[in-house]
Image: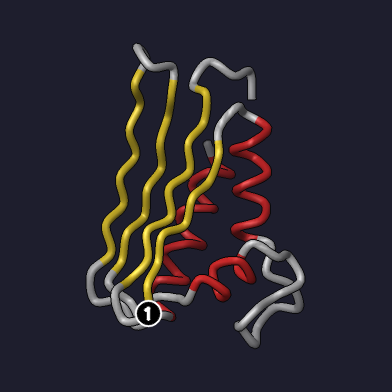
Amino acid sequence: MRELSLHVLDIVQNSIEAGASRISVLIEEDLKKDSMTIEVEDNGRGMSDERVKQAMDPFYKTRKTRHVGLGLPLLVAAARHCGGNLVIESKPASGTTVKATFRHSHID
């Protein structure tokens, strides 16, 4: 759980840096569907389809404070390792939604 909370913190920081004035965090467990979902939605500047693809590349970054951008690539790896996935929906000037799903019963 600590690692997941750090991923949420990283995504929220990205939202702030994208100029978001509204950030929504939803964490939902559904035992009947055997799933856990983490969703972060913002009203920041958003990204083009190309930028969304770049965001999943661990060697692409826009920040000046780090040499690599491992946040989203590590989160997608964790989600897939636990039988889930990560989806990013974004449009320029319309904000971004990052949704990670996990199989709840996975040992990790």
**Residue shown at 64%/71% (left/top)?**
54
With 83 as the anchor, is 92 left or right in this view?
left
Q: In this view of the protein, which residue sits in the foreground, 49 or 70?
A: 49
Q: Where in the figure is residue 102, as x and y percent of width and height?
A: 51, 31
Quarter of the figure that contains the C terminus: top right
With 85 as the anchor, is 32 left or right in this view?
left
- Disc 1 marks a residue whose amino acid type is Pro
Q: Where in the figure is residue 103, as x and y percent of width and height?
A: 52, 24
Seen from this angle, which residue lies furthest front? Answer: 49
With 56 as the anchor, is 86 left or right in this view?
left
Q: In this view of the protein, which residue sits in the foreground, 12 or 101?
A: 101
Q: Where in the figure is residue 68, as x and y percent of width and height?
A: 74, 72
Quickly name the residue at label 1: 92
**Residue shown at 32%/59% (left/top)?**
41
As drawn, 52 above or below 24: below
Q: Alpha-carbon neighbours of circle 1 within 10 Å: few (<14), some, or many (≥20)?
A: few
As drawn, 40 above or below 60: above
* Chosen colour scheme: secondary structure
**Residue shown at 49%/21% (left/top)?**
104
Seen from this angle, which residue lies furthest left? Answer: 22
Q: Quadrant of residue 70?
A: bottom right
